[in-house]
Amino acid sequence: MDDRQQGVDSAPIIRGAQTIDLQEEGSLGVLLLHGFGDTPQTLALLARKLHKSGYSLYAPLLPGHGRNIDAFVKSHATDWIAAAESAFAQMRSRHDSVSVVGLSMGAALGVLLAAELDDIPALVLIAPYLGMPRVLRLAASTHWVWGRLVGQVNARNPQSIRDPIEREKNLAYGSITGRGLFELWKVVRLARKSLSRVKAPTLIIQSREDPRCPPDVAEFALNALGAQEKKLVWTEGAGHIITVDYGRERVFSEVENWLTAHTNGGAAAAIQGRATAEGS
């Protein structure tokens, strides 16, 4: 491990930002991937909901996240991609199957996984960050010019989470550097190029009022996906982090229904099947 990588995860984890691990051997697994600069806290409610339905959940804290801005600056796109790959491999060794659910940049990481693996029964992309506005792309490509001079830039948008209670709970850094923006663009660019190679049945859930991902990005992703079975579900009244925002129960229901439809009747059916087999 080089000095840079050691610095990424050496800082203490912020309280509440830790990895979520709700796994049981042999059950149907679901890998949850959080967004850029954020933490598994944005997926905690969804994780608990799916766990109650019998799924095993794992939401890793990505490198450089949930600690401090110095650790974030040291983390790169390759670190986040490698962490997602490692988490999936670890889960796949323990579970009958592993579906993938990603939020924002986590959805882009999910696309990269599904493009390389052919044993993902279901993929869910929530508010997928698969497109960057032109002004941000320009800023990312020229980060080496202005990044060190400007330093951290405020990246908070109160409309990302419209529910004020949940907005206050959010553990995101709320700032970004030029280098960080460039690393995010690398993930987005790779994921966009990989969409056509995704064969797993894919559900996209997108808010029409998302301030970070405009509707045309979700429509582009739907059209570009190589999956034969794919679906785009629109929600309204929420911002970008729709797993904690207004209307989140609709999001949870859509996710669970998609997983159930593509994992042999879902976790409850799998548990019942094993119990029947053991009793015969």
Image (cartoon, rainbow, N blue to C red):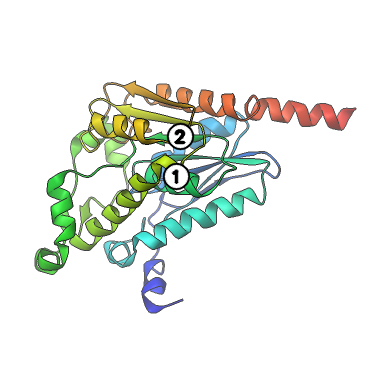
In-front residue for pair 69/168: 69
Residue at the image position 18 percent from the left and 40 percent from the top: 157
Q: Give the residue furthest to the right.
A: 280
Look at the picture and state if 75 lies above or below 210. below
Picture quarter containing residue 33?
top left
Look at the picture and state if 86 lies above or below 118. below
Kindly identify which residue carries mark 2. 124
Residue at the image position 60 percent from the left and 35 percent from the top: 55
On the question of residue 259 being in view, the answer is yes
Mark 2, residues whose alpha carbon is within 10 Å: few (<14), some, or many (≥20)?
A: many
Q: Which mark is residue 110?
A: 1
Q: Does dot 1 land on a helix, a strand or a loop? A: helix
Look at the picture and state if 252 lies above or below 56. above
For the C terminus, which image quadrant?
Answer: top right
Q: In this view, does 28 lie to the left or right of 241?
A: right
Q: Percent position (x, y) of residue 7?
A: 37, 72
